[in-house]
Image: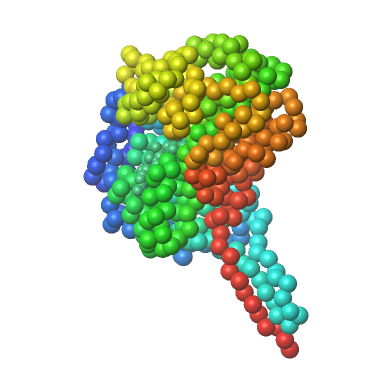
Amino acid sequence: MNSFDPSIVKVRSAHFIGGRYREALPGLEVVRPSDGRYYAPLPIADAMMVDEAVESAWTAFRRSDWATRPPRERTRAMRRWADLIEADAATLAPLEAIGSTRPHKDVLGWDIPYVAEVLRFFAELADKHGGQVAATQRDRLGMQIAEPYGVVAAIAPWNFPLSMANWKVAPALAAGNAVVLKPSELTPFSILRYAELAVQAGIPAGIFNVVQGNGQITGDALCRHPRVGKVTFTGSTATGSSIMSTCAQVGPKPVTLELGGKSPQLVFADVPDLEKTARSVAMGITGNAGQVCVSGSRLIIERSILEPFVAYLQGYFRELRPGHTWSAETTLSPIISSQQAERIDGIVQRSRQAGAEVLAGGGMIEGLGGAYYQPTLLSVGDSQSPAVREEIFGPVLTVQTFEDEGQALHLAEHPTYGLAAGVHTADLNRALRLIRGLETGTVWVNRYGRSNDHVLPTGGFKRSGIGKDLGREAFEANLRFKSVLIDIAD
Ligand code: NAD
């Protein structure tokens, strides 16, 4: 039962404020990426509506016991929420799939269990932290007390609507904050169900709120609101810079930014199983049709194994079946919008004109209603090629070759991005040298992609971001530390 009929999915279009749906006049039309059809209107929260949501969060933070209850009780509520999310998969998964690029079977098999587990991970940190006692003079007691910020604003992208929002919401709530989330205007609905389940789980009304709308009006108003103590954002580098600048002007207030990437996958001739490595590389660029921040979009490969490796990649690309997210047969996701597909194609065509050779794909896939792009392999001689420099956010892999390790490292270095990198080699010392040399927030060795080890934080170096999601670091970033000094002399 991995397929479903999209016409029977009921979508509720609203904000979620103070523990209730808040209907409002529509301002935008939302389209299904799979077939390009309009399926629901979306309200846009203006500054007044944002103010209502932030005030609701602030009131709940001050008046409910969310921040002050025994932390283990916060853990319990969040664990109940995770259980409810899993139990709700029959409702939640079609809602997530219909409006996003996530195939329904992947939402059932990965996104929903992942959201629940990340919630549990952060829930478990709620009662496993404290402050510090400082090394003060004998007749004084110095302490640092960890406290939540109050209201955290979270702004999320569209590529994994539930799980990217959850990366922000879960640590902020576990640390005792209230949250106002703005999901992407392209994928706004599934998160409302997630919010409803939070209230059912016993998280006080108003502690978690959702405002709908675009970046220019709603996102901007949220960042500017004086009661918002911190902004946590995932999205493009350009938007992240703009948010940081807004937060500097109206605050300054702290920001966590998870931004774009252009991640290399380095493959050495000593890998023991070429086909397995090629599969891993191919999955690293075609998963969610390349619409993943850490997509391994630049293959950097030892020249001697280029030909057989490319043949394996071409074979894997041919196996992929583009289709609607509600079909169980789909193994290649749609592109989020026709504008984004045109942008992908624009970069591919500009790169061809600049000398890139197409080894696979290189164009749109027609006939499915929505926008789909062929898994594409571009042989590129020049690191200045647009396909090497720009984040494409589509299933496009560039191929560059090297003769030695030094050249591999040189090619891997990107002038702006530093999100993730993959190293495939049987030589442990070489892997360790490259781990040191690569200027990226994550390095995967002989694999490509995250695991369920949520303790490992994720985040970018250079213009790929500031701060971390996941791990203890993401939890602590939602706390601020108060110094206390007490005279205890007799
Ligand atoms: P985007 O920057 O266009 O939008 C992200 C969010 O910001 C949306 O909710 C949008 O409405 C909002 N926004 C836009 N302008 C705003 C403004 N001025 N003020 C406040 N909010 C504003 O990004 P996208 O297209 O939704 O997502 C794709 C991008 O996200 C890619 O660059 C990808 O690499 C990145 N991403 C990064 C990570 C990571 O962990 N580093 C994870 C997922 C996606």
- In the displayed structure, 182 sits above or below 359; it is below
Which quarter of the figure has residue 300?
top right
Residue at 69%, 25% (x, y): give it: 425
The front one of 189 and 187 is: 187
Q: Is residue 347 visible?
A: yes
Residue at 56%, 59% (x, y): give it: 479
- In the displayed structure, 169 sits above or below 375; it is below
- In the displayed structure, 269 sits above or below 448; it is above
Structure colour scheme: rainbow
- In the displayed structure, 159 sits above or below 304; it is below
The front one of 242 and 283 is: 242
Where is residue 222? Give x, y as percent: 36, 54
In the rendered view of the protein, which quadrant contains the C terminus?
bottom right
Where is residue 45? Give x, y as percent: 30, 49
Where is residue 272? Give x, y as percent: 72, 18
Q: Is residue 166 visible?
A: no
Which quarter of the figure has residue 183?
top left
Residue at 74%, 27% (x, y): give it: 427
Q: Quarter for ligand 1?
A: top left
User: Furthest residue to the bottom?
Assistant: 490
The front one of 85 and 409 is: 409
The front one of 59 and 486 is: 486
On screen, residue 482 versus residue 369, left or right, reads right
Residue at 55%, 62% (x, y): give it: 480
Which quarter of the figure has residue 6?
top left
On screen, residue 189 versus residue 439, left or right, reads left
On screen, residue 446 versus residue 249, left or right, reads right
Where is residue 288? Give x, y as percent: 47, 26
On screen, residue 3 versus residue 32, left or right, reads right
